Each structure stands twice: as C-alpha cells, then as structure tokens.
Amino acid sequence: MADFLQLFISGLATGSIYALAGLGFTLLWQTSGTINFAQGEFVMLPTFALLAFSAIGVPLPAAFALTCVLAVVVLGWGFKRGIADPLLRFGSMPVVVATLGLSIALRNGVRAGYSAEAHPFPSLFGDDVFRIGRVAVTSVDVGTLAAALVLVLATQAFLARTVTGRAMQAVAQDTTSAVVLGIDVPRMIFYTFAINAILACAAALLIAPTYLAKFDMGESLGTKAFFAAVIGGFNNSRGALLGGLVVGVCENLAAAYVSASYKDAVALAIFIVVILVRPQGLVGQRVERKV
Amino acid sequence: MTRQPRWLIGMVGMAALLVLPPFLRSYGLYLLSYWLVFVIATMGLNLTVGYAGQASLGHAAFLGIGAYSVAIVMKAGCSFWLGLPLSAVLCFVVGLGLGFPALRVQSIYLAFATLGFSVAALLVMRYEEWLTGGTSGINDVGRPSLFGLDLGGNLAYYYFVLAVAVVVAALLRGVLRSPWGKAFTALRDNPIRAESLGIDVRAYTLLSFAIGASCAGIAGALLASLVQFVDPTPFGLGVSFTMYLMVVVGGSGTFFGPALGAVVGVLLPEWLRFAQGWYLTAFGVAVIVLMLWLPGGLLSLPDRLKARAIAASRPRT
Amino acid sequence: MTAPVLEVTGLVKSYGAIRAVDDVSFAVMPGEIFGVIGPNGSGKTTMFNSVLGQIKPSAGRIELDGRDITHLSPLQLSRRGVGRTFQSLQVFGRMTVRDNLIVAAQEHRGTMLGRMFAATDNGLGPKADALIDQFHLREVAHRRAGELSYGQQKLVDIAMAFMSDPDLVLLDEPCAGVNPVLVDDIARLLRDLNRVRRRSFVIIEHNVDFVQKLCHRIMVMVEGRAMAIGTPAEIRANKHVLDAYLGN
C-alpha cells in the first residue's frame, strides 16, 4: 500500500508536467488551428537556455525570467510569424510537416551545437524525503505537483476571469463571431502563442531535474501532452490537467504492476478507449456533428 | 496540358532508373533501392492521406509489420515468395483495423490515434523477443531468387525492387482511375455530400487505410531482404513522421508526388552529409523552407509557374 | 387515389427544450412538386435533415412508398432512390464537372468489388453528357467545378442530384444566391425533369414567386410547425400565411 501511494504521488508529479505541455498545445490548436509537433522541443529548448544562463553565472530566478522572455520572442512570436501565419491558410498538412521539420532541426541542432549528453539540472525543491507513516514522499514530487497545479489553475483563471482571457476563449470558439465583436483576433492568437511558450518554460524548469536535460527529452513529451489533453477533454482547459494526472498516475502504476516495457503504451491505450467511447473527453462538452 | 510534360519527365526518369544503376557503386545502389522501397510505401500512404484525406502518422508500423513478416517466415524456412504476399495481406487486415478509429474521429485525433498505433507496434517489436528477437533483431534475412534467377546481388535486387515498384504503381494507378479513385476523392473533399450520393463512406475510409497499409507491407518485405537484417530502429515514430512528410512535400494527392517526396526524405539527408553533425538540422530547416515556399508540395511548382506566366502575360491595368 | 411517395407523420426534432421541428406531417404524391416555405429559422432545413437521416428525429415516422425509413442513414436513402441537394454549395471542387456528375451515381451501379475493375466512368458517361447538355454546362464540362461561377456550380450541384435517376428529390434552396435569369432556367429544368417520369420533388425555397409558379402544393412552416398546406392559390388566399410573412 505504501508503494502504491508513493507511485501514485510521483505519477501525479509527472502528470502535472504533461498537463502543462498539453494545456499550451490545446490553446494553440483551439485559437489558431496550429498543430505543433515540435511541442516537446519547445520544452527542451528552454531547458538548455536555463543551463546556458546558469553556466555564465546567472542565478536561477533571473535565468528563468530571461528564458521566458527569450521563449516568448522566439517560440511565441517567431514561431507564429515564421511558420504558423504563412502556412495555416493552406490547411493543417503544411503546418504539421513544417513543425515536424522544426522538431528535427531543433533536436539535432542542440545535439550538434551543444551536447549529445544528458546534463544534470538543479532541483528547485531540494531533495528532501518526507515520511508520512510508511509512505516516503520526495520534496521534488510535491513541489513539482504544487507548482504545476498553481500554473494550470492560474492560466485557467486568466482565461475565465480576465477580459483578455475571455476574448481569447471567444476566438477559440468562433473566430468569425469574435471578429464581429470587435476582438483583435491576431493579438489574441499571439497571446496564446506567448502563453504556450511560457508554460513550456515552466515545464522545462520542472521536468529537467528528474528527467535530465537532453536533446531528445522532448520526443515523447509532446505526444503524451496531447494524449493527456484529449483524454481530459480538448475543448476544456481543466481537461488537460485531469488528463495529465490520469496519464501520469496510470503510467507509473502500470510500469510497476503490469509491465515496465509497455509504460509508453498506457497513455495510448487510455486515449484509444476515450476517443472510441467518449470522444469529447472525460470533462469535455459534446459537440454535435455539423451538417 | 501540363499532363504531357509530366509524363515525359516520368519516362525519362524511368529510363535513367533502368540504364544508370550498373554504373553506380554499391552504396549508391543501396540508396537507390532504399529510395524505391520508400516510394512504394509512400505511394500507399499517399492514397490514404492525399487522395482519401485521412490523417495517418503511423505508417512506419506497416513497414515494420511487412519486414518482420518476411524475416520470420524466412527464418522458419519458408520462401520469400510466401512472405511477400503474407506481408501485404497481413498489413491489409491490420490497416482495416486501424481504419476503425477514423470512422469515429477525424483530423488531429486521428493523427494521434495512428501515431499511437506506431508507438505500440514499435513496443511489440522491441519487447516481444520470442517473436521479433527484441532489440538485437533478426539476422541473415536472405534474398529470393525468381525462376532460377538469383536476386542476391545488389544490382539484381535493385532491378527486382524497381519491378515491384512499377507493378505497385500500375495497380494503384488502376485503382485511382476506377470509380474507387473518384470515391476516395469525394470522401476527402466532402464526406457528407459523398454519403448523400450513395458513396459508402465507411467502407472507403477503411479501404483507404487497408490499401495504403498493404503497400507499406510490401515495401517492408522488400526492405527486410534489402538490408538482410531486421530490428526495430527503422520503424520508429520518426520514420512514420518522415513518411508523412514525404507525401506532403512531394505533393499530396498527386500520382508522382511520393517519388519526389521520397527523394527529399531519403536522398536529401545523404546529400547533406557534408554538413556532418549538422546534417539533420539542415534537413529540418530545408523541410521548413520548402513548405514555406511550396505549401502544396513540390509538384505544385508547375501550377505555380503557369499561374505566374498567365499573370505576367496579362496587360497591367 | 394513389399512395404517397413520401409520407411524414408527426415529425419532431427537439434540442433540449427547443422544438426545432414540432409535429410536422405531410405527404408527397407521385409526380408532385411539393414546396416548403417559411421564414428563416422556421425549421425547414432541420425537417429536411431529419427526413434524410442526416440528423436523428426525436419522434415521428417517415415512409417511402409505404415502407418505414425513419432511421435509415443518408447512404441507405440514397440507395433507395432519394436524391438531395444541400442549402450551401456542395460540389467536389477539385474534380471536373463531368467527374462530379459521374461520382454522383457511380455507386448505384455494380458491386463494390466490381467497381474497382470498372471503367473510369462506370458506364455513366452518356448519362452525364446528357445532363451536361440539358443544364448547358457543355463548355465547362472538363473544368474543375471549384473554378466555375457560383451559378454554374449551383447547376452542377442540382444536376448531381439527378444522376442516379432518383424517384424522390429533396432540394434545399436551389435558387439561393442565383440571379433572376438563372432562377427561371432552374424552374424550367426542374419542370422538365419532373415531366420525364412521375418523379416527385420537395423544394425548400425563399423565392416565393418561384415556388408559386413551380409547385403543385406548398407547405408553410412557422416556428417549427406546418401552418398551412395547400395549392398555390389556397396559400395565396390564406390570411394567416400573409400575417406570418408580412404582419407583426
């Protein structure tokens, strides 16, 4: 039972990182129709930016702030203007292929230009171990979970409570009506790209201590982030959180009790069941097929 | 009117593929065979993605199923000529199965469902050692002989792959020219209208996956005997992505698109080797630039040039 | 007294508390052109889509030649000889006009497997050419449908519904967005097509003049209900209908 709880809690921590990446992914898709296959690399790149800033002696909080600014400019504005804007009007195929190309370029660029090795990354939350009864809980897991939860809930509050956030949701639901309502659609879309970049930086900061900084660390992260978002409910920002946690926990439990080899198939299996049985996701709203 | 030059270029290309290979070194021959294998596989994917409009990011799995089928059958002492059709049939059946999610969900959901299938297939190849040999793979996969003609040599095997590619292309051409071709296109352009005209959208969706998959199965079978060794590496998610990339970069929904796309996907990285450690980065950048320049793929270039010529010939007002 | 081709009884389609189609009943006789008019949002298209299996009706019964077709899919209805057009243009833009017509009927001939080996036009070339001539589309027959003018695309769209020789055709606003000259052409074409056999039409249309001239009987829908059914003269004389359209 103690093992089970430990696995459960560390699963929650991993899942909360999936949720962060998945939330950005769904925001991009909803507001602009961009499918970003470089989403994993969008987490990998800030990790190395953080490392680079640390290497020249910048303290971590300042390094994180700098990385966020850099990410908003490059992964937000640059990505939107350079790839999404020119290609979206040709349908989803060219964007998918261009982001696949981007993912290959970024991953191998970091490998060739920086290092092919895995680099240790300092933890934000120390490496204490608490014991509650017979259950050992690490400070990393608790800290990661707490930080990710705060970020997801903050994003959600921003979307639901602020004028800008509501305008962004209006764009996500119906771009044409948003234009009629006088919403500055291009600006709202840029905001989602910026938010996606910042969430990716946060995910980088949280995931790197556990999984190490490596050029291919984004490989499975992007996919799992998407699975998490669909499982939870694609048209619901709370969905990404729930889906992420479900995937993280199930993966951990399956790896321990069923088969470690097939850990990566767990998210897939849940995903398939969800799209076949409840395509709108666990907490999503059903959308009727348009005629 | 653009048809004639296109076919002419095709004929010239075909002649080059017949005449030039004896002058190539063995690595060049190997690459050319490898390219043909991917042409066969992406011709199938082009039917699924380009003509029928279904999202599929799991095609490398079928390449793998085809390769392992032949390797396992030949290890069991049976002939390549049993393995090849078995690969095609097995992939057809599995492809039908993969089509079922497509009846429920579309676009991005379907893309990730197929992508997930690719991951699952890779895990089976990697961990079901009793069947696949795990990460160490299956060694010494032989090459066949045909009516006493030994296809073991690199040049002979190249011509064999070329012949299969031509046969598969001719069969696909036949399917696309038959009423099925129009039904696939109708399914892509407007499934609701298609159904109201009596087109069985479910059946054609499943068929588009199954036919696409069986082409990849054949390609996989040829790949196993080409490399003479099968392990999970060439069937990973990256390869699924690359195959999709080849279809789109070549020009999805165009008959010769896959041949060009496979040049980009298979041969371009080789040509970029001069960039050493940076060659894959250069490849990624090249793909992005290509998409920005020609979002409709390489084969949209003639249309683009024609449109420009018409615009230029029009007097300015 | 002959039996009706299409008989709709007590059709209801509700979305939550809203009844988009509220207890609508009507019958269409062989050879009849049956018009459906009504203000925007009166449930005409929802009624159409419920009859045609595009959406599931909440209640009611639909019969084709006396047989229940209430829960059949659009595919099954097409195979039973029910043709339709949609409110918005629905041609296959990247196919030629001729291919659009051929694809509209190819699945009605032969078996699935047989069609894989069939000629590219599946024997429908002459039929397509006849309709192309009848609809005056000869000059654009080999152009991509998406490149044509709106009016020409509308003609292709309508012609497609007739390729498989359906006994019953439901047309959703065939004159929407079409210039007055073409409206007359469409009326003439539909009248000709109606004469060929005892083929029945149901036509939703906003152009009251068009409906008055073409249809044998007209149903007026208001707020999901069938307010009146009658001949054009009866509808013209109906005070409630006038109120619904002109009053308030």
Image (cartoon, rainbow, N blue to C red):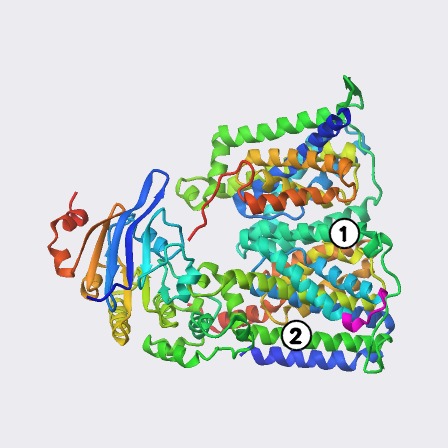
Q: Chain of mark 1?
A: B
User: For mark 1, does the 10 Å Cα neighbourhood hold few (<14), some (14 to 19), or many (20 or more) residues?
Assistant: some
Q: Which stretch did the figure color magenta?
A: B75-82
Q: Amino acid at mark 1?
A: Val
In the orientation shown, which residue stands out farthest toward the top?
A133
**How far apart in space, not on screen, are marks 2 and 1 (Cα)?**
31 Å
Q: Which residue is mark 1?
A: B124
Pick whichever, A50 or A5, lies toward us: A5
- In the rendering, which numbered label is found on residue B169? 2
Callout 2 and callout 1 share a chain: yes
**Tag nearer the camera, 2 or 1:** 1
The tag earlier along the polypeptide, 2 or 1, is 1
Residue C160 in sight in this render: yes
The image quadrant that residue A63 belongs to is: top right
Rendered position, A133 above or below B78: above
Q: Chain of mark 2?
A: B
- In the rendering, which numbered label is found on residue A5? none
Residue A218 in sight in this render: no
| Residue A24 image position (x, y, % from top left) | 61, 39
Label 2, secondary structure: give it: helix
Pick whichever, B110 or B248, lies toward us: B110
